[in-house]
Image: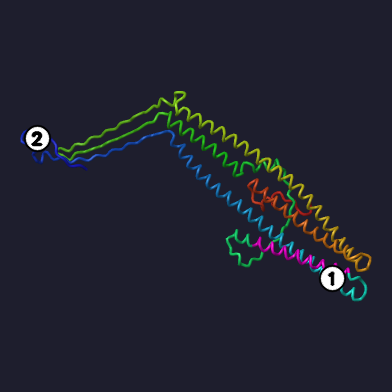
């Protein structure tokens, strides 16, 4: 709202005159609207950016979950190994005690007692070293979870190995498009295409500007006025070869082609990773079968050797070797099963699938193994 004077001289005639009929009150409203065809592509890119950030967050959460799962079951394996080492120590301790009794009764030589005592000390040292490593790894795991290193934690769980029978081509066909890196690469192509279209319409397509204006004057008699205008702008330089805007369009097209090439490379790399993990799983299962047979043979060998030692046909060193072979066979099986489980986790990450769902979908029942 404005108030002013009209139709009154200032320096001529009678000079400035303040009269009622010279007073004027007026008000006006103006609206201007510019339309551009590139706006929808800009809005679409904003949506893509939001979806990409959500995808990155979800992928990071899954990767962290897999790393924590690996650390957890690695600690479970270490805990089981401590139990094995405790059993080895107990066996060595009992053997040492038997040898002492046999030596006092004149059934074995003093060398057997010394050797059995050395076996006890070796077993105790191995257990102590493994316990220290387990405590350190447990502290790191608690720190990863945000807990205090002084907190007491008891790990409950066991490594139950299930054979995975899944073909690489089947996994690639069903789950490759769902990988976060593949999805991100496709969205990047879509973003660049939207940016190219947005730039095209902003620089080459005609733009329409609309404006409206309405004003009134509080005067006797009352008067008002309304006006509207439209302006159509058609750019010229983007259509001329060699101009900066024309070259900008070419660079946008090149960026799209590069993004498509990156997508192809990412897909090939993902296929190779999935095929490699499937092959490693098959070979690793054969290793588990061999390790289980090796443990069975080592346990039977130890039992027979222990019987031979008690009957006096086998020396204590042979018995100790048999006991160490049994302990090594158990540790080898434990590590082989842990390696297989880690491969399951890696494969689940490669196809963007929860590892429990992977086992449930492609696991082989025990009676079919």
Query: Which residue bears the numbered disc 2?
Result: 11
In-image side of 66 versus 37 (left or right): right
Where does residue 303 sit, x and y in percent of width and height?
87, 64
- The quarter of the picture where residue 140 lies is bottom right
In-image side of 369 versus 13 (left or right): right
Read off the magenta span: 111-138
Quarter holding the N terminus? top left
Q: Give the label, 1 or 2, closer to the camera.
A: 1
Foreground pick, 266 / 178:
266
Inter-mark Cα distance, 1 to 2: 129 Å
In-image side of 364 versus 47 (left or right): right
Label 1 with label 2: CB-CB less than 8 Å: no
Where does residue 261 sit, x and y in percent of width and height?
60, 34
Where does residue 183 sit, x and y in percent of width and height?
58, 42
Secondary structure of the residue carrying tag 2 is loop
- The quarter of the picture where residue 239 lies is top left
Where does residue 124 sit, x and y in percent of width and height?
77, 67
Up-down: is 197 above or below 48?
above
Query: Which residue occupies 12% across, 38% down?
Result: 22
Up-down: is 129 above or below 221?
below
Secondary structure of the residue carrying tag 1 is helix
In-image side of 183 versus 9 (left or right): right
- Quick check: is 237 in the magenta stretch? no
Q: Residue furthest top?
A: 240
Query: Which residue bears the numbered disc 1?
Result: 96
Nearest to N terminus: mark 1 or mark 2: 2
Query: Which residue occupies 20% across, 42% down?
Result: 2
Around disc 1, counting alpha carbons within 10 Å, would you say few (fewer than 14), some (14 to 19), or many (20 or more)? many
């Amino acid at each position: 709202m404005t108030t002013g004077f009209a139709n009154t001289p200032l320096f001529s005639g009678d000079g400035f005159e303040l009269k009622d009929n010279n007073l004027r009150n007026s008000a006006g409203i103006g609206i201007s609207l510019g339309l551009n065809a590139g706006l929808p592509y800009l809005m679409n890119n904003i949506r893509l950016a939001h979806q990409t950030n959500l995808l990155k967050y979800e992928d990071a959460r899954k990767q962290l979950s897999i790393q924590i799962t690996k650390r957890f079951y690695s600690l479970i394996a270490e805990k089981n190994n401590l139990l094995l080492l405790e059993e080895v120590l107990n066996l060595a301790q009992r053997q040492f005690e038997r040898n002492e009794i046999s030596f006092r009764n004149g059934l074995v030589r003093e060398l057997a007692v010394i050797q059995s005592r050395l076996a006890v000390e070796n077993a105790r040292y191995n257990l102590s070293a493994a316990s220290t490593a387990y405590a350190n790894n447990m502290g790191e795991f608690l720190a990863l979870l945000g807990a205090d290193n002084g907190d007491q934690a008891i790990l409950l769980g066991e490594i139950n190995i299930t054979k995975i029978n899944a073909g690489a081509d089947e996994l690639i066909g069903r789950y490759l498009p769902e990988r976060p890196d593949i999805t991100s690469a496709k969205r990047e192509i879509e973003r660049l295409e939207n940016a190219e279209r947005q730039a095209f319409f902003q620089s080459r397509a005609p733009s329409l500007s609309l404006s409206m204006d309405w004003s009134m004057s509080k005067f006797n008699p009352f008067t008002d006025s309304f006006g509207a205008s439209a302006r159509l702008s058609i750019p010229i330089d983007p259509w001329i070869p060699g101009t900066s805007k024309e070259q900008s369009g070419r660079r946008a097209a090149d960026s799209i082609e590069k993004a498509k090439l990156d997508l192809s490379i990412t897909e090939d790399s993902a296929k190779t990773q999935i095929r490699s993990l499937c092959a490693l799983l098959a070979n690793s299962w054969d290793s588990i079968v061999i390790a289980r047979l090796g443990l069975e043979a080592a346990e039977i060998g130890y039992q027979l050797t222990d019987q031979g030692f008690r009957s006096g046909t086998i020396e204590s060193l042979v018995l100790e070797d048999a006991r160490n072979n049994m302990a090594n066979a158990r540790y080898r099986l434990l590590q082989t099963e842990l390696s297989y489980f880690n491969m399951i986790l890696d494969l689940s990450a490669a196809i963007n699938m929860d590892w429990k769902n992977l086992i449930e979908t492609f696991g082989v029942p025990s009676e079919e193994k």
